[in-house]
Image (cartoon, rainbow, N blue to C red):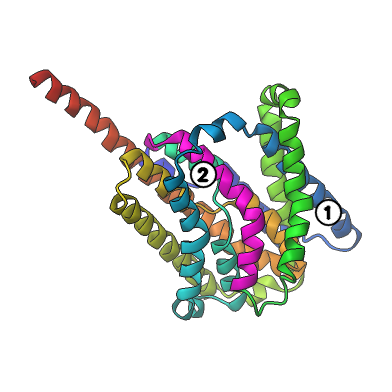
Amino acid sequence: MARSRLLPDNFTLYLVATVITASLLPASGAFAKVLEVATTAAVSLLFFLHGAKLSRQSILAGIGHWRLHLVVVASTFVLFPLLGWALRPVLEPLVTRDLYTGILYLCALPATVQSAIAFVSMARGNIPAAVCSASASTLLGVAFTPLLVGLLMSQNAAMGDPLAAMGRIGVQLLLPFAIGHLLRPWISGFLQQRAAVMKVVDQGSILLVVYAAFSHAVIDGLWSQVPPMALAGLLAVCAVLLALVLTLTTWSARRLGFSKEDEITIVFCGSKKSLVSGVPMANVLFAANVAGAIVLPLMLFHQMQLMVCGVLAQRYARREAAAVPATAVAQSKA
C-alpha cells in the first residue's frame, strides 16, 4: 500500500503529458488567442463549481477552533514565505532565477482543499477543522497571495501592481466562487449527481491553463533556459522546503499542546500548496512568457507533497489503529 503511494497518480501523468504536448506542439497565433479566452472561461467555471460545492455548515462546524486555524494560516502565509526568503542565498544557486521566482510564488500560495482534507481523513485527524482551515486558506489567498508576491518579488516587473492583481483575481476567481456558493441551494443536488463531469471540469481547466502557460514559455525558449542540473536542483529545493515545513508544523503542534487529531490537521493543512489555485493565479499575476517557468516548481512540489503526505498519513493511521486495541486490553485488565 505504501509503495503505491509513491507512484504518481493519473492526474500527475496527465500534467506530464500536457507539458510534453506543449513542448512539442505549443499554441501560437490565432489558436493561442482562442486558447486564452477558453482558459479564462474554464478557470471561472472551475471556481464557480468550487463555490457551489462548499458547504457552509461544514465551515461553521470547525470555525470555533481558532488556535488551530491561526497556526495553519501562519504556516501557509508566514512560515512558507519566510523560509523562501531566508533560504534564498543557499537555494537560489541550485536553480535558475526564473525557477527560484517560482519557488517564491509557491511559498505565497494558499493551501489545498481536497487533498488536505483527504489526508486528514485518512490519518484520522480533526476533519471539520480541516475543512474550515483549508477553505479559509483558499479565500484568504485571493488577498494574501498577490500581496506576498509583491513583497517577495519586489524587483520582478513581470507581476505588476499587487492591488491591480487582486482586482483581476477577484473578478476572475472570487466572483464566480461567490456566485456559485449563493446558487448552491438550487444547484448542489444537480452537481452531486454529475460528479464525473465535475471532475472533468476540475482537472481539465488546470490542464488547459498548464498547456497555455507552457506554450508561451516554450515559444520563448523555456527549455533552452532550464538546464538539466537546474531541474535536479529544483527537486532538491522542493524536498528541503517540504521537509522543513513538515518538521516545523509537527514540532509547533506538539509544543503548543494540541491533541493528536489537531496535530494531524495542522501538519496536513499547513504544509500543502494548492495547484488548483496556483496555476490560475499565475495566469493572472504574471506575464505569459514567464508563467510556465513559474508554475514548474509548483507542479513538482504538488506531486512531492502528495507522495510524502500519503506515506505520512498512513503512519498516523497505523499508530491510531494500534492505540485502539491497546486501550481495549488495558480496560479489560482493569
Amino acid at the residue labelled 2: Ser
N-term-proximal mark, 1 vs 2 = 1
| Residues in magenta, as a range | 123-152
The answer to whether residue 6 is seen in the rendering is no
Q: Which residue is mark 2?
A: 133
- The residue located at (43%, 52%) in the rendering is 71
Which type of secondary structure does the marked residue at label 2 adopt? helix
Q: Quadrant of residue 328?
A: top left
Majority secondary structure of magenta residues: helix
Q: Position of residue 43 (x, y in %)?
A: 75, 47
- The residue located at (68%, 40%) in the rendering is 202
The answer to whether residue 255 is seen in the rendering is yes
Q: Position of residue 159 (x, y in %)?
A: 71, 70
- Horizontal side, residue 181 vs residue 57: left or right: right
Q: Position of residue 280 (x, y in %)?
A: 70, 54
Membership of 168 in magenta stretch: no
Membership of 127 in magenta stretch: yes
Give the Cα separation between the discs numbered 1 and 2.
Answer: 34 Å
Q: Which residue is mark 1?
A: 35
